[in-house]
Structure formats: C-alpha cells, structure tokens
Image (cartoon, rainbow, N blue to C red):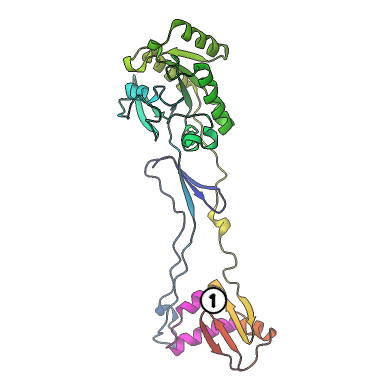
Amino acid sequence: PVGTLIIDKQTGKVMKDLTKHGESFIAAKGGKGGKGNVRFKSSVRQAPNFAEAGGAPQEREVILELKLIADIGLVGFPNVGKSTLLSVVTGARTKIDNYPFTTLTPNLGVVKYKDDSFIMADIPGLIEGAHTGSGLGLDFLKHIERTRLLIHIVDVSGSEGRDPIDDFNMINYELESYSSKLSKKPQIVAANKIDLASDEQYKRFEDYILSLGLRVFPISAPIHQGVSELIDETYKTLVSLPIEVEKYDYFDPSEMEDRDYKKIEYIKDNDVFVLSGKQLDKIFRSTNFNDMGSLRYLYKYIENSGVIDKLKDLGLKDGDTIRINDFEFEYIE
C-alpha cells in the first residue's frame, strides 16, 4: 500500500519510499540469462552440445514498513473520542465503543471541506511508555510521522479518572521521547466530552493550553458540538503549512554488487587443489560432462584464466587432483 518503506535489512537503509498509487520497485533482480549453444558454434564445432548457464539471481532480505500518509493525525489517550470524531467528520465506519483500545489499527478518512478535501488518520490510543513499546506504542507512533498537523484530543471531563492536563502532557512527552520531529508538529487541541465537563474543569484546562500558545476547541463529537469550528480551524491551519517531503539516505543496490565475480579462490586440502569462484561456478554448471567439446571449453577457460599457472605455483604436478564443486579430475600435463 501507499506509504510502504522498503528497507534493506543488511544495511538498515531505505531502498524505496512508495508514496504514489501504482508505484513499483525492484528490490532484487533475477540473474542475467546465459548463452545458448548456438553462441558456441564455430568452424570446428558445428553443433555444440553445451550452453552457458544463466547468472545467479540477487538475494536480499528486505523489511516492509508501513507508515500511513495523512494530512491530519488524531492523537490522544485511549477512549477519548478519536474514532468518534473521525466518523463524524469523514463518515468512516470505525469500531466505536466505550472501552480503551477499541481501535487497534489506524483508520483513515477523507474530510470534504467546501471544494477541497484532506485525509485524517485516527491513531490508536497512546499510553504511558508508548515510546518504549508499551501498548503497541511504537507501531502507532510511526504512523504519526507522515502527518502534517495533529489534533490532540483530550477528555476534558476526566471521565476515566485522569487529569486532562496530565493526559495532555503525557502524550506530548511520548511524542517527544519517540522523535523530536513529532514534538515539533503543529497541534490543535480538542477538549472533547465538553458536555460532561463542568465549567470549572474546562476553564482550568483552557487556561493551561492557552498559556502554552496553543489553540483549544471545546467539542462533543457524538452530538457534533463545536466540530464545525474545529474543522474550520484545522483546514485554515493545514493550507498554511508547507508540504514536507521526507528525505532518506537511499540505499543504492549497486553498492552491494559483487566486484569479485571473476575472482577464484585456491585452497590446498592435503593432496587436493580446491577451486571456487562465482564465475567459475557458473561455467562449471554449464558444462556437459558427457560432451568432449563442452569439456574442452571448460579447460580452455581454466587455462586462459591463469588457474593452472597459479596452481603450479602452489605445487601442482602431473597426476594431482583438482576439485571444483563436487567434481574431481586428475591433472595431466
């Protein structure tokens, strides 16, 4: 889905950020095709009975990480009314109930505003310790990174037995602890469940939020009280914000290309000379050991690549054994 990061597991670097619908990316390429037997035809080899095997495909472990892309992120403790607000302003059919963690995965909805629209994401409720992974916090926090503006929803009535100001500060602490980038995102505060709060409760909370230089809107999402004013301010703020493009130090697969493809390793195992190498292995796999022409081609490659000279430097002599993969043959001068 849109918003998926493709990450190379070995380096931890991002290979691709899929931000557009229908976008594609090749994380690992198939091996290069080999040469057919016709390519080895010559005046003395009219019907070669061998061909070159194709190259080995690339192998790569990747991590697929989804970070939803939305304009607005709804954040707050569980059961403060985020899903209700999303359903009211977007018509999204979200699971709504009066208990914590009703929402376990982010929900998206489109807010239609006059002749425009924007995407709103209901981020599952955060709890104390979310930045360390408590309550699936890390899974939830990463989705906030792509948003441009946060609506911080607080149960101003304290119906769950918590202090609204403490709730507000705790969520911001979790955002900052996870990433300084999240703590710097602009916020609009929605004091929800205003119909259940006393005037004193709201005034205390409002004074505190205003002292921080933030805007606060009293709302009751179920009965739509104050919701229009909140969305008006949200749109006004959103259009004034720049559209950020995330920058990554992208991983270049060519950095991992095998520059030792033609290299041959030599090991003397008692009286056996063991050869190994990627190009050598490819040619060896192409060899038809029942065809003399194919065997000559293999020997010609070994001879032209300087293998025999190198083995002689290691003490190779007539009658010694050479091993390539699981195949052994006797060297005859």
Q: Residue 154: x and y, percent?
A: 46, 19
Q: Position of residue 59 (x, y in %)?
A: 48, 61
What residue do we see at 41% from left, 48% from top?
A: 24
Looking at this view, name the residue that lies furthest to the front. Answer: 161
Residue 289 lies in the magenta-colored region: yes
**Above/below status of 291 relative to 186:** below
Q: Element at badge 1?
A: helix
Per the image, is 183 magenta?
A: no
Quadrant housing the C terminus:
bottom right
Tell me if residue 112 can be seen.
Answer: no
| For residue 276, side relative to residue 114 (left or right) | right
Residue 87 at x, y percent in the picture: 33, 24
| Foreground of the two, 58 or 63 | 63
User: Which image quadrant for residue 37?
Assistant: bottom left
Q: Would you identify the image quadrant in which residue 109 lies?
A: top left
- Nearer-the-camera pick, 83 or 292: 83
Q: Which residues are magenta?
A: 280-304
- Which residue shows up at 57% across the image and 64% down it? 258
Predominant secondary structure, magenta span: helix
Splitting the image into 4 quarters, where does residue 218 fall? top left
- Residue 165 vs residue 235, the one in the foreground: 165
Q: Residue furthest top?
A: 199
Which residue, given by chain and number where applicable, does mark 1 sit on? 280
Q: Position of residue 181 (x, y in %)?
A: 56, 31
Question: In the rendered structure, which amino acid carries the disc numbered 1?
Answer: Leu
Badge 1 density bin: few <14, some 14–19, many ≥20, Cα 10 Å: many
Q: Residue 317, relative to residue 134: is it above or below?
A: below
Which quadrant would the N terminus be assigned to in this image?
Answer: top left
One can see residue 27 in this view: yes
Number of numbered callouts drawn: 1
The residue drawn where x is 33% and y is 26% is 97
